[in-house]
Image (cartoon, rainbow, N blue to C red):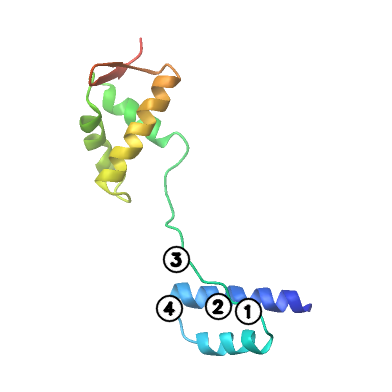
Amino acid sequence: MQDKSIDGALLALRKNIIRGNLDGLAHVEALLNSREVHMPAVLPAKKADVARRGHMTRLVLDALRNGPKTTRQISAIIAPARPEISPDEAHRRTEVALCNMKYRGELVRDGRLWGLAR
């Protein structure tokens, strides 16, 4: 096995130990120190976003089926459907989805109300 493969495996092991709050960090870092390998800072793991392509578009269209609504009303309908994100994040994502859908011609805006394009 090449040295760079061993170093890479040790660095990956170190990252998993730190992120998983597991035992053995001192041993792995001792091995890396003896091999004179630079140990970069380990950032927290990214949260998995369970959104699927077109999911927000479908949620917005479903919310607008019963007539025009404001952004707040739409995001209040969407928030329970996306429990993995905060209500503020649901509102932000709703605003982005609305603007993208308006650009594509799927929605129209009349003052504060959003509606389906005919």
C-alpha separation, residue under disc 3 versus residue under disc 1: 18 Å
Residue at the image point whose x is 31% and y is 27% from the top: 62
C-alpha separation, residue under disc 2 versus residue under disc 4: 10 Å
Q: Which residue is mark 1?
A: 10
Mark 4 residue type: Asn
Q: Which mark is residue 14?
A: 2
C-alpha separation, residue under disc 1 versus residue under disc 4: 16 Å
Q: Which mark is residue 21?
A: 4
Mark 2 residue type: Arg
Q: Can you say whether 113 is above or below 75 in the image?
A: above
C-alpha separation, residue under disc 2 versus residue under disc 3: 13 Å
Tell which circle, 4 or 3, labels the residue nearer the N-terminal end.
4
Mark 3 residue type: Pro
Task: State if disc 4 and disc 2 touch (CB < 8 Å).
Answer: no
Residue 118 location, quadrant = top left
Crowd band around label 3 with a 10 angstrom C-alpha radius: few (<14), some (14–19), many (20+):
few
C-alpha separation, residue under disc 4 versus residue under disc 3: 11 Å
Residue 37 x %, y %: 66, 80
Residue 71 x %, y %: 25, 29
Task: State if disc 1 and disc 3 touch (CB < 8 Å).
Answer: no
